Image (cartoon, rainbow, N blue to C red):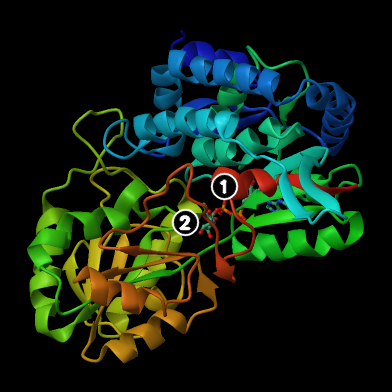
Amino acid sequence: MSDYTELLARVSAPEGSGRPIHDPATGAEIGRAPEASVDDLDAAIARARAAQPAWEALGHEARTEILLRAADTIDANAEALAELLSREQGKPLNGPNARFEIGACSAWLRTSATVALEPEVIVDDGEVHAELHYRAIGVVGAIGPWNWPLMIGIWQLAPALRMGNTVVLKPSEFTPLSVLALVSVLNEVLPADVLTAVSGDREVGARLASHPDVDKIMFTGSTATGRRIIESSAGNLARLTLELGGNDAGIVLPSADPQAIAQDLFWGAFINTGQTCAALKRLYVHDSIYDATVEALAEVARTTPMGNGLDEQNVLGPLQNKQQFDIVNRLVEDAKANGGRIVTGGSPATELGELFYPITLVADVADGVALVDEEQFGPALPIIRYSDVEDAVTSANRLDVGLGGSVWGDRDEARAVAARVQAGTVWINSHGGVHPMIPFGGVKGSGYGLEFGVEGLKAVAVPQIING
Ligand code: NAD
């Protein structure tokens, strides 16, 4: 049990060194991020390599037991981790935000620790007996983003550790302290050097991805960085799981009830104040219920409190960083200039703080407008009118990304439409919910490889056939 200041003291660089990290809600400095060099990273990888055989040799049962104790340490430090996360990332404590994220870390770690990955008998015909086993890969490099920094970190490290790999993790330069704190808490029970976090800039990330002694990269971040990681894998032949950007479409069918779906539509789009990979980022609504849906969403937007995340009443927070704030602002301004009708929000909420942007619903926009075509990754949602569902499906599929999608309305009708949406996951009457046993991954420019459950364990293992 610790409070957040104690966790910070463990991981923050001493005064006068490192890089200042600011609370996006207030601008106050909360701590200093250690800045590892490429040499520090090389040393961490060497230690991970040395620790790996013994960790693998422990076997599944022993690792399961250790990882479950590691999950207990998350629970024991949950409130401190949530507070540090809220101060560093900006997301509120309450709602589907910081406390929720810490709870998910514990839940995902427990599932990764306990899900069974049994050998498969592939052929057994009296003459040939061949089995497929899954072995550790070796050293896994984990590189993460700033939006769900702890949960995504756990998504990467938990299955990798469970399968007997050691892990070197590089957090986003925007949210290093909370990730370092999580790793410090886990390391209360993990053997030395099995899990190391190295806080550094993009150059350190690039070195991790291209390092000759790294066997697998788990990467979550932008499509642009994903492409660079693919290039560097030509050098070290690292296996890759790439969870990249998205621009998820939601299609609301005429059979949907606008009032009944408004809350779920809202959170599908605005969870983590829209800074979520698989958030609903463009909404296609049938003409017959367009106005009613826009108004029902606007009503939720007007009554959902935004502000400093440490205030228990708030469930929406600031943008995490100026770069993302500028993207959202630019896209909304461009949509206005291109005929978009602002229903709520529409300009920065400077009264709340420098990085706050209100929930912005933009109606009467069309495909081709930048707010529709580019990933906004923030609290602005374009709502597009359609009259033929064929056109809505074509629109949903016209971009070169395919992480998630959703269809809203009569379940059977919606399932038939869902089958034609090009995305790794299509939800019916909800958007963005993930589950530790349900595989998750993108298609097209959203990347490749699956995380979670049995498929997620296979992704951090190498197959081996025992024949005979
Ligand atoms: P980003 O690609 O800028 O950075 C992600 C990480 O990569 C950071 O840790 C960064 O330091 C590191 N990095 C930068 N250059 C690198 C290089 N050349 N080699 C190796 N590592 C490098 O992404 P971001 O801005 O932190 O995150 C936002 C993006 O991530 C959005 O596009 C969003 O959709 C995507 N995202 C996807 C998922 C998913 O599951 N698909 C989840 C969260 C975020």
Q: Residue furthest top?
A: 1
> Which residue lies at the image location 25% right of the left edge and 85% below the top edge?
339
Q: Is residue 293 left or right of residue 186?
A: left
Mark 1, residue position: 145
Return the residue nearer the eye: 410 or 403. Answer: 410
Distance from label 2 to label 1 (Cα)? 10 Å
Q: For mark 2, give the secondary structure.
A: loop
> Which residue lies at the image location 11% right of the left edge and 60% below the top edge?
260
User: Cβ–Cβ below 8 Å for labels 2 and 1?
Assistant: yes
Mark 2, residue position: 277
Q: Is residue 402 visible?
A: yes
Q: Earlier in the sequence, mark 2 or mark 1?
A: 1
Q: Residue furthest front?
A: 126
On whether ligand 1 comes within 8 Å of the CB at mark 2, the answer is yes
The three-letter amino acid code for the residue at tag 1 is: Pro
On whether ligand 1 comes within 8 Å of the CB at mark 1, the answer is yes
Return the residue nearer the eye: 106 or 97. Answer: 106
Frontmost of labels 2 and 1 is: 2
The three-letter amino acid code for the residue at tag 2 is: Cys
Q: For mark 1, give the secondary structure.
A: loop
Q: Which mark is residue 265?
A: none
Q: Residues within 10 Å of mark 2 (few under 14, many from 20)?
A: many
